[in-house]
Amino acid sequence: MPSGYYSIVDRSASCSAFISVGMLAGVARSISLVESIATAPPGAGGGLAGRTPISGLRVFVSPVDTHKGTGSWAIVDDRSFYADNLSAGDYRLYVHFGNCCGFTQDVSVHDGGLSVVHLDLSRYYSQVFAQSASQATLYELAIAPDGTPWFVEGLGQVTRIGHIGSNGVLSEYELDRNANVSALTPRVDGSAWFLSGNVLRQITPKGRVVALTAEQPERISELAIARDGSAWMADFMGSNVVHYDPSSKKTQTFKLPFVEPGQENVRITASTDGSVWCTSLGGNRIFRFASDGAMTQKDLPWNCGPNTVQDWNNAHIFNCWSGASGAGLIDDATGKASPLDVPGTNDSSVSFSAPLDGRMWFIDRKGGAFVGLDSANKKQTIALKAPLYAFALVGANHRLWFIDTGTHEIVSLGIDGRAVRYPSPSAPRDDTNMPPIDQLVPDRLGNIWFIVRHDMALYKISVVGQVERIAVRARRIEVPR
C-alpha cells in the first residue's frame, strides 16, 4: 500500500465504524476502530506522518500562529509518528529529544491528503546557532591610550575581540569558541591584554593572539598592570593572586589567608607608586604588594568590606560595601587606615567614587547628593532629589557622569549642580534583568563611551554633548552544518 491518507471502514448489518488514518509505505500500523464508531462518513481533513532520524524523539503538532502549547502529541510507534484528523492548514512540529531541547519544522496539511514529513536533524544545530546569535552583544569596553575603543564581541557560539582604529576600520580577533573574556586592557604599545580561560593572553601590535601564561588552576578574572609593566591577576571569589613578569616570562602565585569560599570578592588595582593593592570584602582587609613582591596585610578595625583602592594625595582611598562610612583612607607615611566622613550605602552596594578637579566624589544615594572631599578632607555637597538611583560614576571634562537607573538616563552633572540628561538608548528585550548599560568609559579628551546590552554598537557622547552611535558590523559567522 503506498503512503497516503485512508478512510478505513468496518460495516455490519446495523452499524459501521470508520477511522481516517495516515499510512506510510512499508510500515505496519495498529488501528483501533472501536474508538471511532459513527454512522456518517468522515468529514474533510488530512494527516501527517514520518520517520524520525533517531530513536527516542517525540513530536508535538501545533497549528501555526496559535498560542504555544496548543495542539497534541503525535502518535509514535517505534520511529514512525502520525497525526490524524487534522484540519487543512499549516502546522509547526516541535521535535523533542526526550525531555530536553529540540527543534521546529513546519508542514502543510491538505484535505484528504497525507503530508509525509522528513525531519531534518540539521535544523537543531542551525536553530541553536540562530538563537545564540540573536543574543549577540558587546561587552568589556575599554579605551586605549590613543583614544580608540576595544571591546568584546559575544556572538553566540563565537567570541571575538574588536578594535576600531583611528581610521575608523574595525579589526576582529577570533578566540576559542564560547570564550569568556574579562579585564580587557589596551596598552600604550598598541597591544591589548586580557583574561580568558584562566590564561593571560595578548593581542600583539601585529594582530596575533598569544598566551602569556599557562592555565591557572583557579579562576582568574581581575587584572591590573603595574608601573613596571608586569601583570597582577586575582581570583574574584577566591584567595589567589598571580604575578606575571613579561621580562622573565615567569609567574608567581600568592596564597592569601582564606576567609570563606565565595565571600572574598577580590578587587585588584595598580598604583602610580608601583605598588599593587588587593581588597577582600569578606575578610574586611587590604593587601599591598610592593614592586619586589613583598606583601603586607592590613585588617580594617571597622566594618567596611573594602572595594577598589585608588591613589589620593600621598594616600590611598578605598570604597566600602558595608558599615556606616562609605569609604576609608590609608596614609602612605604612617600606614594607618581610618574611615572617611562619607555616608555609607548600607544596601549591599558600593559607594562609587570618582576623582574630578582635585576632589574625590562619592554617591550618597539615600541623601540624594554627591559628596566631594578635597586633600584636606573638606566636604562639598551637590544636592539632588532623594533617593538618588546613581550608578557607574565617572569624572570627565570637569563634570560628573552617572547612570540614573530611576529615570533611565545618562546624566552629566556640573559642580554648580546643573545637570544635562541624555535618555538611554532603547535596549533590545533581555530576560536577564541585567542593566542595559553597565559602565561609562571616559577617554583622554573627555568624551564618554558606553555600550547597550544586545545592541551591536558603541555610543559616544562628545565633549560638546553630541550623541553618536557607531555600528559594529561584525564579520559574518558561518552556520555549522
Image (tube, rainbow, N blue to C red):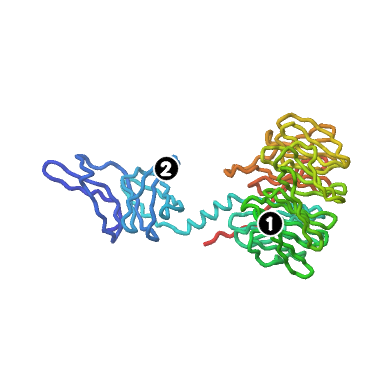
Mark 2 near mark 1, Cβ–Cβ under 8 Å? Answer: no
Q: Nearer the viewer, residue 7 or 377?
A: 377
Q: Which mark is residue 257?
A: 1
Instruction: Note whether 478 is above or below 59 in the view shown.
Output: below
Count of numbered labels shown in the rendering: 2
**Can see residue 168?**
no
**Residue 262 pos. (x, y %):** 62, 51
Q: Secondary structure at mark 2?
A: loop
* Quadrant hosting residue 76: bottom left
**Residue 241 pos. (x, y %):** 71, 59
Q: Residue furthest front?
A: 301
**Residue 454 pos. (x, y %):** 63, 47
Q: Nearer the viewer, residue 223 or 317?
A: 317
Q: Which mark is residue 69?
A: 2
**Residue 56 pos. (x, y %):** 38, 57
* Quadrant hosting residue 192: bottom right
Q: Image check: 373 left or right of 181?
A: right
Q: Quarter of the image containing the N terminus?
A: bottom left
Q: Nearer the viewer, residue 172 or 108?
A: 172
Q: How many C-alpha atoms fall within 10 Å of the one at disc 1: few (<14), some, or many (≥20)?
A: few
* Quadrant hosting residue 191: bottom right
Kind of residue at disc 1: Pro
Q: Which mark is residue 89?
A: none
Q: Secondary structure at mark 1?
A: loop
Q: Nearer the viewer, residue 290 or 35?
A: 290
Q: CA distance from mark 2 to mark 1?
A: 54 Å
Kind of residue at disc 2: Gly
Earlier-in-chain disc, 2 versus 1: 2
Instruction: Note whether 324 is above or below 50 in the view shown.
Output: above
Which residue does the image show at 77% across and 33% down from the upper left? Answer: 369
